[in-house]
Image (cartoon, rainbow, N blue to C red):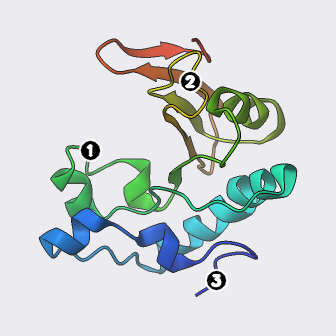
Amino acid sequence: MNLSEHFTLQELVKSQTATRMGIDNTPDSFEVAYLEKLCRDILEPVREHYGIPFSPSSGYRSPELCEAIGSSRKSQHAKGQAADFEVPGIDNLELAEWIKDNLDFDQLILECYMPGNPNSGWVHCSISQDPRGEVLTYVKGVGYSKGLST
């Protein structure tokens, strides 16, 4: 099932952990509607801006899958409202800055990025009906800080 021009339901629900552990990672129609909005409002504009194909490393995660990987069952991933991704050849800080400056989002997190290593980490971006526009950086072993810090 196509969620948008360049993104499919299959790629936004894929999970090696779910497969390995026998976890059903099938979203309901409510969650699929949010995945379509996520593609339309975040993933497609990123794809169009950079002109580079990419596939999210994580999209929808059932509450059971969230729990299995140590995430919250109430994560926006479990609602179909979030994706983690990188664009090949693009510095993840640059990607996060472009999203911050050009798209409406609920939460944008530059995760595990290491200055001087443009391929490190990834970008987490979420949507909601009432977007907060929250921007954070997560550094392993340190935690979260406001803004895009390096």
Residue count near mark 1 (Cα–Cα under 10 Å), binned few <14, some 14–19, many ≥20: some
Return the disc, 2 or 1, that comes first in the chain's sequence.
1
Residue count near mark 3 (Cα–Cα under 10 Å), binned few <14, some 14–19, many ≥20: few
Residue 56 in percent (x, y) is at: 54, 58
Question: In this rendering, is residue 99 above or below 97?
Answer: below
Q: CA distance from mark 2 to mark 3?
A: 34 Å
Residue holding disc 1: 72
Return the disc, 3 or 1, that comes first in the chain's sequence.
3
Residue count near mark 2 (Cα–Cα under 10 Å), binned few <14, some 14–19, many ≥20: few
> Label for residue 138?
none
Residue holding disc 3: 2
Question: In this rendering, is residue 116 above or below 36?
Answer: above
Return the disc, 2 or 3, that comes first in the chain's sequence.
3
Q: Left or right? Give the position of 30 relative to 7.
A: left
Q: CA distance from mark 3 to mark 1?
A: 27 Å
**Nearer the camera: disc 2 or disc 1:** 2
Amino acid residing under circle 3: Asn
Residue 113 in percent (x, y) is at: 51, 25
